Image (tube, rainbow, N blue to C red):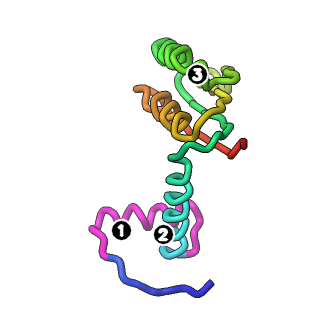
Amino acid sequence: MALKRFGVSLEDEILESLDSFVKEDGFANRSQAIRFLIEKNLAEKKWQCNHIVAGTIFIIYDQQRSDICARISDIQIKHQNLILSSSQHYINEGTCLHVCTVMGKACQLTALADEMTSIKGIRHGKLLMSRAE
């Protein structure tokens, strides 16, 4: 595929963030990082649809925060039609990994993952999906 060159104007802070991203993620240059970000964004937009997908929501949080566990449980009860299974794994003394296997319309799973991963106190959350139909 032929490459096209174009100019991009960025504020200093955004350019510094891009350079940090390039360095931390091991990209060869800014162009490679920008291509990755654009492709990632396009792929994520494709999931905002009605395709039936299966996936997993991973959440990492401080196990001492019982309120987080309770919130996750409340959300899962509300969306039990999308949840196939759910488990917790204590990965070290203070950290819990919550794994939720899900299936449904991509837009529903995206909304569910957004609701779960936006709980105050979540260290990290991620939804992975694959088309199931």
Q: How many marks?
A: 3
Which residue is found at the position 27% from the left and 68% from the top? 11
Which residue is found at the position 66% from the left and 40% from the top? 53
Q: Mark on residue 15?
A: 1
> The C terminus lies in which quarter of the figure?
top right
Which residue is denoted by mark 2 in the rendering? 34
| 126 sits left or right of 11 in the view | right
Kindly report the distance in space between the C-alpha atoms of the residues bearing marks 2 and 1: 11 Å
Q: Judge whether residue 26 can be spotted in this image.
A: yes
Which residue is found at the position 58% from the left and 37% from the top? 105
Residue span colored magenta: 9-28
Circle 1 packing at 10 Å, graded few (<14), some (14-19), many (20+), is few
What amino acid is found at the position of numbered circle 1 in the picture? Leu
Q: Is residue 21 magenta?
A: yes
Q: Judge whether residue 89 can be spotted in this image.
A: no
Please provide percent x and percent y for residue 129.
Answer: 64, 43
Decide: is 31 above or below 40. below
Kindly report the distance in space between the C-alpha atoms of the residues bearing marks 3 and 1: 36 Å
Kindly report the distance in space between the C-alpha atoms of the residues bearing marks 2 and 3: 36 Å
* Residue lying furthest right: 133
Q: Nearer the viewer, mark 2 or mark 3?
A: 2
